[in-house]
Image: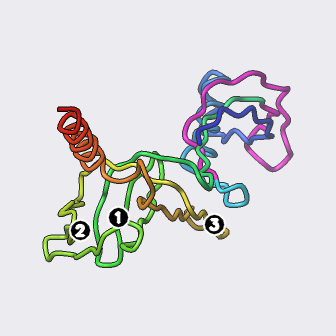
């Protein structure tokens, strides 16, 4: 889930940025300190600095060339939540499962969680259902549910996904199933 957070922090503006206007120097420092960084305690990744709300008085510490400021700002972050429905794109397939980009992170759909069908894996890196003949290849758009979130200090956020529930799967599969359902309904009405 995406959040806009209000954050208060004491940041150090590096001496190399002191030639910039204060707000630009602080914005640059916030970008370097936050954007793309993972907070493993809260399982979230910071995406963008949106707005600087306030900047306190600068403090110089003897022997340190930087200046320290108390800053309040807004940031956009993403935190995957258990049971959240997400849409993404298949990045690559491996024999054990499919890696799906969901926003700023990549989740794994284990091959047992791809579909309610026996799944085979081809040498071209494509999964195919035995009965349904549905295929899943890199570039396919999918809808999945988050079933596991794991973090360890200093590592990426790991997300487990499933596509074995009603309304989940490759978007092409979902369209085909809807069309087939509508055809069957029209046929039954005749």
Q: In x, y percent, where is residue 94?
A: 29, 74
Question: Please, is residue 109 above or below residue 36 in the view?
Answer: below
Q: Nearer the viewer, residue 95 or 34?
A: 95
Dot placed on the residue nearer the N-terminal end, 3 or 1? 1
Q: Comparing marks 2 and 3, which lies closer to the viewer?
A: 2
Residue drawn 76% across and 36% down? 7
Disc 1 + disc 2, Cβ < 8 Å: yes
Residue drawn 47% across and 48% down? 104
Look at mark 2 in the image and give the residue it sits on: 129
Residue drawn 67% across and 68% down? 153
Does residue 109 appear left or right of residue 76 in this picture?
left
Question: Please, is residue 109 above or below residue 56 in the view?
Answer: below
State the CA–CA distance, disc 3 to disc 1: 26 Å
Q: Picture quarter containing residue 24?
A: top right
Local SS, label 2: strand
Dot placed on the residue nearer the N-terminal end, 2 or 3? 2
Magenta stretch: includes residue 57: yes
Work out which quarter of the rendered image holds the C terminus and state it. top left
Does residue 178 appear left or right of residue 6 in this picture?
left
Local SS, label 1: loop
| Residue reaching furthest to the left | 124
Look at mark 3 in the image and give the residue it sits on: 151
Look at mark 1 in the image and give the residue it sits on: 115
Point out the stretch of residues depicted in magenta: 44-71
Does residue 90 appear left or right of residue 28 in this picture?
left
Q: Main secondary structure of the magenta part?
A: strand
Q: Nearer the viewer, residue 145 or 89?
A: 145
């Amino acid at each position: 889930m995406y959040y806009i957070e209000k954050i208060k922090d004491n940041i150090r503006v590096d001496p190399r940025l002191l030639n910039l206007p204060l707000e630009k120097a602080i914005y640059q420092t916030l970008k370097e300190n936050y954007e793309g960084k993972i907070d493993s305690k809260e399982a979230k990744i910071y995406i963008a600095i949106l707005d600087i709300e306030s900047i306190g008085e600068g403090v110089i510490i003897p022997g340190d060339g930087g200046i320290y400021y108390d800053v309040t700002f807004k940031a956009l972050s993403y935190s995957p939540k258990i049971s959240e429905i997400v849409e993404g794109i298949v990045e690559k397939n491996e024999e054990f499962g499919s890696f799906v980009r969901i926003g700023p992170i990549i989740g794994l759909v284990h091959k047992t969680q791809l579909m309610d069908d026996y799944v085979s894996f081809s040498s071209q890196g494509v999964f195919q259902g035995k009965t349904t003949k549905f295929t899943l290849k890199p570039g396919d758009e999918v809808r999945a549910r988050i079933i596991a979130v794991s973090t360890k200090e200093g590592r990426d956020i790991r997300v487990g996904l499933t596509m074995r529930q009603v309304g989940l799967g490759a978007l092409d599969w979902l369209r085909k199933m809807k069309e087939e359902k509508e055809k069957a309904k029209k046929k039954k009405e005749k």
